Amino acid sequence: MIMSENILISPSILSADFADLGAEIRAIDAAGADMIHIDVMDGHYVPNLTIGPMVVKALKPHTDKPFDVHLMIAPADPLIQAFIDAGADYVSIHPDAGPHLHRSLQAIKSGGAKAGLVLNPGTHADVVDPVIDELDLILVMSVNPGFGGQSFITSQLDKIRVLADKIKASGRDIILEVDGGVNPITSQQCIEAGATALVAGSAVFKGAGSYAENIAALRRQSTATSQVA
């Protein structure tokens, strides 16, 4: 059974007001966020361009919550250490973002961060098998990466179930995170499937002054799920 208080909420600042990111991070911290999700896009691996290490470094003093950095870049290796030095606590990469996945994950861990692996909707769950001992986090993309505000792809629920079983069998404490189209309805489906962390962008940042209420709405679904698990 997954208890509601153990579900991590990691708001994605991709949906925040980029003109005032420091204030936005302080606001979601106060509203009950467990982590801060930072989507890094290079305009090459995904068709969008967001932020680099200098912005991450500038944002770090605004919160004590862990920075959950998702690198949608290729190749990832040349910038891994730069993001760690900037303040990334978790660094998650895609399996096709470099020629040697195991080496890349080792670089994250040796650099001082926790290592995550990201599975796009078209990526098979078995990709984690050879490297599961290196992982601290597995991120399931329930939309295709590159843009916020997309609709949840329900076929990814089966993948979450498979990955939850793999994590259990490994005996390791690995966060199973879901990103894309997460709202108070789909969050319940994700948790029922075995997710332990939720990334939410639009669902958290909609409505100025409502961030605590929006995060609480995700947690209410978590509570309902835990009671029937």
Image (cartoon, rainbow, N blue to C red):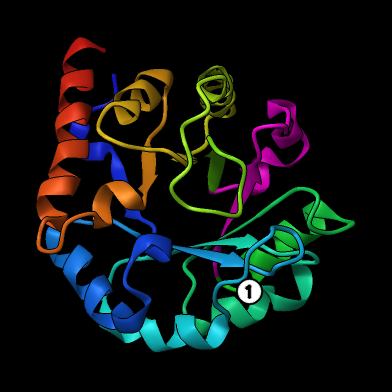
- Residue 111 percent coordinates (x, y): 63, 74
Q: Residue at x 14, y 63 (%)?
A: 208
Q: In the rendered structure, which segment of residues is drawn in magenta?
A: 113-136
Determine whether, in the image, residue 45 is placed left or right of residue 9. Answer: right
Given residues 51 and 10, the one toward you in this image is 51
Amino acid tagged 1: Gly
For the N terminus, give its image quadrant: top left
- Residue 123 percent coordinates (x, y): 72, 33
Q: Quadrant of residue 35?
A: bottom left
Given residues 181 and 225, the one toward you in this image is 181
Q: Which residue is mark 1?
A: 111
Q: Residue furthest right?
A: 99
Q: Residue at x 72, y 32 (%)?
A: 122
Q: Residue at x 52, y 36 (%)?
A: 172
Q: Is residue 116 found inside the magenta-colored segment of the image? A: yes
Q: Is residue 148 found inside the magenta-colored segment of the image? A: no
Q: Quadrant of residue 41?
A: bottom right
- Residue 150 percent coordinates (x, y): 48, 42
Determine whether, in the image, residue 133 is placed left or right of residue 44. Answer: left
Q: Secondary structure at mark 1?
A: loop
